[in-house]
Image: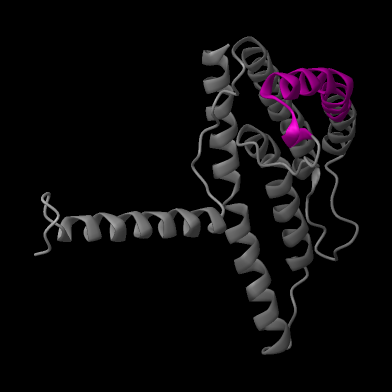
Amino acid sequence: MERYIRFADSVSAWFGKAFAWCIIVMTFGVGYEVFVRYVLRDPTSWAFDLSYMMYGTLFMMAGAYTLSRDGHVRGDFVYRLWQPKTQARVEFVLYFLFFFPGVLALILAGWKYAERSLRYNEVSVMSPANIPIFQFKMIIVAAGVLLLIQGIAQVFRCVICMRTGEWPKHQEDIEELEDILLKQAEEKALQHSSEAVDIIHPEGEKK
C-alpha cells in the first residue's frame, strides 16, 4: 500500500506541476488581450476562449495533486477533535459513499461528452474565431482518471492509519506563506536564544 501511495502521489504531482504552466499561458494571453484592446484598439477573437480553457484545464488537472497533498478544503471544526483512527474510519466510509461514485460518474459521463465532441470536431460557438474545443473536453476524463488513482491511495492511507493510529505523511513540496513565516520566526527565536546562551561561560560568568 505504501508503494502504491508513493506511486499515486508522484503521478498526481507530475500532472499537477506540468499543467500548472497553464496559468502562465493564460496570463500572457489575457495580458496581450488587454494591450491590444485598450492600446491598439484591436481586440482579439480568441482571448476569452484561451482564458477559460487554460483556467479550466488547470483547475481540473490540479484536483488529484491537491488531494495528494491534503490541500482540499475540509469543514474540520469537528473532524480535528477526533483521534486519527476515528478520522480514518470516517474518511474510509465517505470515500466509498461519495468520492468514488462521483468520480466514476465524472469519468463515464465525461467520456460520452468528450467522445461526442471529438466525433464532430466541436468548435466554440462563443467566439467568432471558431476555436476547437473537443480536446478541452477530454480533460474531463483525464481529471477523473487521476482522481480515481489518487482516491485509491487515499483509501490506503485510511487503512494504514486505522492500523497504526497515525496518518502517513503527505509530501510537502509546497507551503502556505503563513507557515513559512511562522517557521522563519521560530528559527530566528531559536537562534537568538542560542546566541544568548553562548555569551555566558559554562561557569556562569559573562564574557
Residue at 52%, 29% in the rendered image: 10
167 or 188, nearer to the observer: 188
Q: Quadrant of the C terminus?
A: bottom left
Residue 15 spot, x, y in % from top left: 59, 37
Q: Quadrant of the N terminus?
A: top right
Residue 99 within the magenta-colored segment of the rendering = yes
Please count the marks in the image.
Answer: 0
Q: Is residue 1 left or right of residue 145?
A: left
Magenta stretch secondary structure, dominant? helix
Question: Residue, x 62% and y 14% (percent of image)?
Answer: 160
Q: Position of residue 126 (x, y in %)?
A: 89, 61
Q: Residue at x 85, y 66 (%)?
A: 128
Q: Nearer the viewer, residue 32 or 64?
A: 64
Across and down, in percent, residue 136 comes to: 76, 44
What sort of colour scheme is used for the picture?
one colour
Q: Nearer the viewer, residue 19 or 116?
A: 19
Q: Is residue 47 above or below residue 195?
A: below
Q: Is residue 122 above or below residue 13?
A: below
Residues rendered magenta in the picture: 79-106
Q: Quadrant of residue 26?
A: bottom right
Vertical placement of 46 versus 173: above or below? below
Residue under the point 66% across and 42% down = 71
Residue 37: x, y in percent? Answer: 73, 83
- As drawn, the residue found furthest toward the front would be 204
In the image, residue 196 above or below residue 12:
below
